[in-house]
Image (cartoon, grey):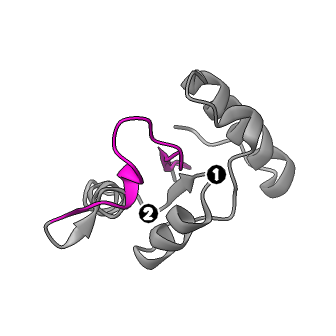
Amino acid sequence: MINGFALIPARGGSKGIKHKNLQKIGKHSLVGRKIKQAFDAGFSRVIVLSDSEKIREEAKIYGADISYQRPANISADKTHMFQVYKWLLIEMQKRENVIPDY
C-alpha cells in the first residue's frame, strides 16, 4: 500500500486579493475547490497547512486534515515551498512516526 497525501499550503496573508483562499468561486471557496480536486484525484488524505484559523476551519468543512498548523517562521510571503514541505515531513515523522512515499 502506498503511503501518500496531498498537501495544500494556504497562507492567510494574501497580498493581491484579501482573504484569497476564502473567496468563493461559484459555490466553493478557493481552498475548498483545491481540497475537492485533491480528493477527486484519488488522494485519501489531504492536508491543508495554514497559519489562518479561518482557512483551517474552512478546510475542515471540506474534509481536509488540519492537524498541522503552519508556523509563522514558514508563513512569510517569500517563504520557499521547500521549507514548508520539509517542515511538514519532519513533523509527520515526529508525531505519526511515518515518512510518506509521496
Occupied quadrant, residue 89: top right
Q: Are there few (<14), some (14-19), or many (20+) residues within 10 Å of tag 1?
A: many
Tag shown at residue 44: 2
- Residue 40 position in % (x across, y down): 25, 61
Occupied quadrant, residue 42: bottom left
Occupied quadrant, residue 79: top right
Horizontal side, residue 44 vs residue 41: left or right: right
> For the point 36% across and 50% down, which residue is it?
20
Given this view, does label 2 or label 1 mark the residue nearer the observer? Answer: 1
Q: Is residue 7 magenta?
A: yes
Name the chief secondary structure element in magenta. Answer: loop
What amino acid is found at the position of numbered circle 1 in the picture? Asp
Mark sitting earlier along the chain (2/1): 2
Tag shown at residue 63: none
> For the point 55% across and 28% down, which residue is it?
77
What residue span does the magenta drawing correspond to? 2-25
- Residue 11 position in % (x across, y down): 53, 45
Tag shown at residue 51: 1
Q: Is residue 19 above or below residue 14?
A: below
Q: Are there few (<14), some (14-19), or many (20+) residues within 10 Å of tag 2?
A: few
Between residues 96 and 81, which one lies in front from this camera angle?
Answer: 81
Horizontal side, residue 16 vs residue 76: left or right: left
Q: Is residue 6 magenta?
A: yes
> For the point 56% across and 50% down, which residue is it?
3
Q: Is residue 81 above or below residue 52?
A: above
- Residue 75 position in % (x across, y down): 64, 37
What amino acid is found at the position of numbered circle 2 in the picture? Ser
Q: Is residue 61 above or below residue 79?
A: below
